[in-house]
Image (tube, helix red, strand yellow):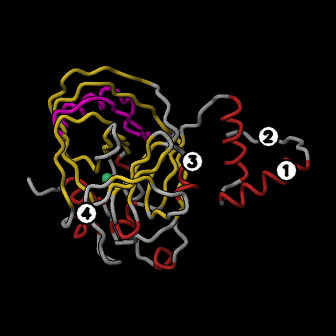
Amino acid sequence: MKTITCNLPDSLYRALLERTRADQSSCDHVVSMALSQCLGKPMHTLFQVSTSAALVEGLYQGAVEVSRLLGHGGFGLGTFIDLDGEVVVLDGVCYRISADGAVTEVEGHQLVPYAVVTRFKTEFTIGCHRLRSFEDLVRVCDELRESNNVFYAFRIDGTFSRVKTRVMRAVIEGTGLKSAASAQAEFLFEKQQGTLVGLWSPGFAGSFSVPGYHFHFLSTDRHRGGHVLECMDFTGTIRGCAMNEMHVSLPETEEFLKADLTRDPSTDLLSAENDHESK
Ligand SMILES: [Zn+2]
């Protein structure tokens, strides 16, 4: 990180202050974003709303508007208030996948309790032909990662013979993530063309993130999706980038400020993310 001092016209300075207020961001952040766009140097920053520990403890109230989320990146995933559906952010659009299977675009003023987004830019890419299972796909992603100690985003586009997803149903406030996950809806899609939006987080980030891989699926026609449990016979392209900066926006809700978040969330998180009916 470097510190610079520079002279700005009054009008630009006022506009800068207005933007920091509107986005609830720091001056450092707004200036970095503006320079990044102007100079064509994308910042590989992960922007996260709330923490996985808060989710595990049942804190699902709205924290950040979708429009602010999209200001930090057009690629990512998350969940909605009361866990009512799954978030997929792809190509700058935020989609909601509901427990009845419907996919809709989400308006900017809606709030999300947990999400992670980034500005995806391809740093590495590989073509794949008929990767048999989810495990095989993960193995290829592992080979593409150079480190276990930074975050990665993966964009996987192509065709699948099968994709199995789950979508959370709305729960009453305070229901822990583990019991909430037992009431999920599951979907099996066959012969699908679509995109897996994926993030990989290091093990040490367990209180904040979901350690390891976390994939959400969205079909090319934007009619099907969900949190990925399994997929089969993938043919297409895996692209990815590393991220070594993280910006976490913590909720200011009373529930969050008063919650006891000292418990290690990793066991509950693992079973909520991976368990499903067929296991
Ligand atoms: Zn998920």
Above or below — where is 119 with respect to 174? above
Task: Find out whether the residues at labels 2 and 4 contact each other: C-beta distance under 8 Å.
Answer: no
Residue 228 in the image: x percent, y percent?
Answer: 25, 46
277 lies above or below 237 = below
The reply to whether dot 3 and dot 2 touch (C-beta < 8 Å) is: no
Q: Earlier in the sequence, mark 2 or mark 4?
A: 2
Residue to which mark 3 is pinned: 72
Going from N to C along the chain, the mark reached first, 4 or 1, is 1
Q: What are the residue bounds of the magenta stretch?
A: 134-162
Among the two numbered marks 1 and 3 on one chain, the one whose residue lies closer to the N terminus: 1
Amino acid on which disc 3 is placed? His
Judging by the rendered image, the residue that carries numbered circle 1 is 13
Element type at marker 3?
A: loop
Q: Secondary structure at mark 4?
A: helix
The residue carrying mark 4 is 268
- Please, what is the three-letter code of the amino acid marked with disc 2? Ile
Residue 96 falls in image quadrant? bottom left
165 or 56: nearer the viewer: 165
> Disc 4 residue type?
Asp
Q: Amino acid at mark 1?
A: Tyr
